[in-house]
Image (cartoon, helix red, strand yellow):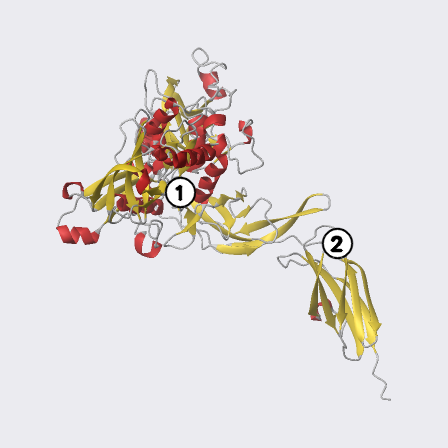
Amino acid sequence: MPQAIGLAILEALAISDIVIIPGLTFAGLVGTVALTGALIGLQLLLPKPGLPKQEDGSQPLRQAIPPRNGGYGRARPQPYYMLYEAQNGTSYDVLALVSGRIGGVAELYLHDDVVDVDGSGTVQGFPDGRYGGGRVKILTRNGQATETAYAEVVAALPSIWTPNHRGDGIASLALICAGVKAEDFTTVYPHGLPQPSAVMDLYPVWDPRDPAQSRDNPATWTVKDNPVLALIDYLTHPDHGMGLDYDSVIAPAIDEWMAEADLCDAPVAKRSGGTERRYRANGWYTFDTKPEDVLGALLSTCDGWLAEDADGVLRLYVGVYRAPDDRLTIRERHVLAFSVQHGVADEERINEIAISYISPDHRYKEVQCQPWRDEADISATGRVRSQQLSLSWVQSHSQARRLAKRAMARFAAPMRGEMTLTLFGLALLGRRWAPVQLPFVAGLEDAVVEIQGARVDLAHGRVTIQWIVVDPATIDAWDPAMEEGDPPPVPDPGPGQSTLAPPTNLVAAPDIRTPFENTNVVVIAMSWDPSPRGDATAEAQYRLSSGGDDDWLSASVNAGNVGAETPPLVDGASYDVRVRYRVGSLRSDWTTVTHVQVGVPPGVPTDLSASLVAADVQIGARAPSSTNHYELVFYDATTANFNAAQEIGRVPGAANSFAAFTHTAPAAGAHYYWVTSATASGVESAPAGPVSVTVNMPDPG
């Protein structure tokens, strides 16, 4: 419908200066004016006063009426005390984390120490005695619609905390700290009574690209850090978002939104090797944060551009250039007035962008990274004019640097200005880029502009746009070796913590399992040497070898911390695995990445036969029924030992199909033949055979 209206505008303007556009409402145009340009992500360079500081999550607060928290991706929201009591020398604290269901807790903190807990929630003490002796316990809830009260708190404080204190729909944390002797207090609690917080996988979101998910069943949703999916959720969710009508503002353009989501997920090369997804969004907000500030935070992670088109549908473009529709070319007949600024006024010039982002390696604190500088301009002017780029929902150094480059390109645009257009300009609403062909304006003879804002004056039949010229050939260019720079250094381990060596002698190999009758699956089984430290916990990860640095998934580590196993994997795919040790907040380096090719062996071929036809041997076999991706592999040898056999040919075979192969004019004597099945990735079955054929000496005549 929006495209149809845009074309209707163009067609109508071609025949008349006066046009009535069905379905175009003033309210819709007001919405367009409010959204177009004002929410271009990288225009929001300064921190917004309404957004909470992401690093505030390390400090729990006591507040009579605390705000409610929400968020997307992985972040460390600020906890708020709901209970702060002591009984018989033991303290009992319950803190609200997030309003609504979350994906789960990824890390637990006491002060700025990352701590591990066992199955009962007991914190594993540090080598220097912190939190040791089983004195500290942390329990969590994920915010289900009907939750479960903390039984230990209820038992200790029945008069003030009952089984009805469940915290329905609130992700929460309970901290229980036992008292210690006075002489041991500074050892066990060196920072005083522990202050808890958590890194969490926040709101699950609906991903229309996943056929296993249903928009009507939030239980099928999963946590994603894709900014497009987060925007859809925030714009339309009735509880923790703006509550806009999905069917009206998103659904008509859902295919376009998913194309933007795919662009965010596309891999981008990193200087260290491997890739990461282009744009990710991870952050938290309070429910009293202004919606435009939350939208701005999300858009800033992807250089996003959000606008309402002439039909009231929201259009989104992330920071990847796409050639605009030639039918929307601004020509001389469309322009009523214009102003042009060449270059940038001296007082507005910016040649350095100071970049801050949130670093998981720094306990989810804000860090400054290497600024993006226009060295040529700095050298020419002799002055550094700096602007802050606060990316509080970005957690990747590479992503922050890429966004800073795009921001600098916008600041340094060679031309900018305003154009007052006829009602042709209505067709540009909801469009990020537009072609321009104005032969009478130097630099705009054949150019592309990015629309920065729009004003609509229906009474006088005018649309005014603000624009900058962009260079399609360079706007997306990125050289990680030269432009990514160095991330901020990670601080050394804190007091009382020594260095931790990584696991040694990692061995990883595919392992066939049969969890169900006649069904094989393959996993990767890993093993390594025990750590010399008995308190070390192992972490194991795996990913597709084609994946990026942010695509690692957790494997299941066994109870002895010397082995791990992945879930069932894709037959024929190549995987990477790695392992590290962890003691409290201390982590070792990862082991060197190990590559593993996996595959499930197919069934053994049947109906094997071999017969002499003239001077040739005809071999046939039937492929097994377990798959249709088999090739039949033939072997020939002069002994009945399969280990000495040599492959002499391959024949494609579908499930249950009969395949034949001709061994042309073998030498005289006894020959033995086997047939194996093989997957497309080359994983073979056990052999069928042998069958033997004797080739006679030719008659000397």
* Residue 401 x/y as whole percent: 31, 46
Q: Nearer the viewer, mark 1 or mark 2?
A: 1
- Between 205 and 520, the one nearer to me in the picture: 205
Say which element carries label 2.
Answer: loop
377 vs 315, nearest the viewer: 315
Q: Residue at x 30, y 42 (%)?
A: 332
> Which residue corresponds to mark 2?
624
Residue 524 appears left or right of 315: right
CA gap, disc 1 and disc 2 = 45 Å
Q: Position of residue 111 (x, y in %)?
A: 33, 32
| In the rendered image, the vertical position of residue 179 relative to residue 265, given as above or below | above
- x, y percentage for residue 45? 27, 37
> Which residue is at the front of the view, 420 or 60?
420
Give the vertical position of 649 relative to 30 (above or below).
below
Side of 693 where 407 appears, left or right:
left
Q: Amino acid at mark 2?
A: Pro
Number of numbered discs overlaid on the protein picture: 2
Label of residue 270 in the image: none
In the picture as drawn, the residue positioned furthest to the top comes out as 159
Q: Residues within 10 Å of mark 1 (few under 14, many from 20)?
A: many
Q: Residue placed farthest to the bottom in the image?
A: 701
The vertical placement of 239 against 674, above or below, is above
In what quadrant of the picture does the C terminus appear?
A: bottom right
Q: Residues within 10 Å of mark 2 (few under 14, many from 20)?
A: many
Q: Of all residues shown, which one is farthest toward the front?
A: 15
Is residue 196 visible to us here? no
Q: Amino acid at mark 1?
A: Tyr
Q: Could one spot residue 583 in this view of the protein?
A: yes
Q: List x then y, in percent, for residue 283.
A: 37, 33
Q: Which residue is mark 1?
A: 279
Counting residues from the start of the chain, the first of labels 1 and 2 encountered is: 1
Q: Would you identify the image quadrant in which residue 685 lies?
A: bottom right
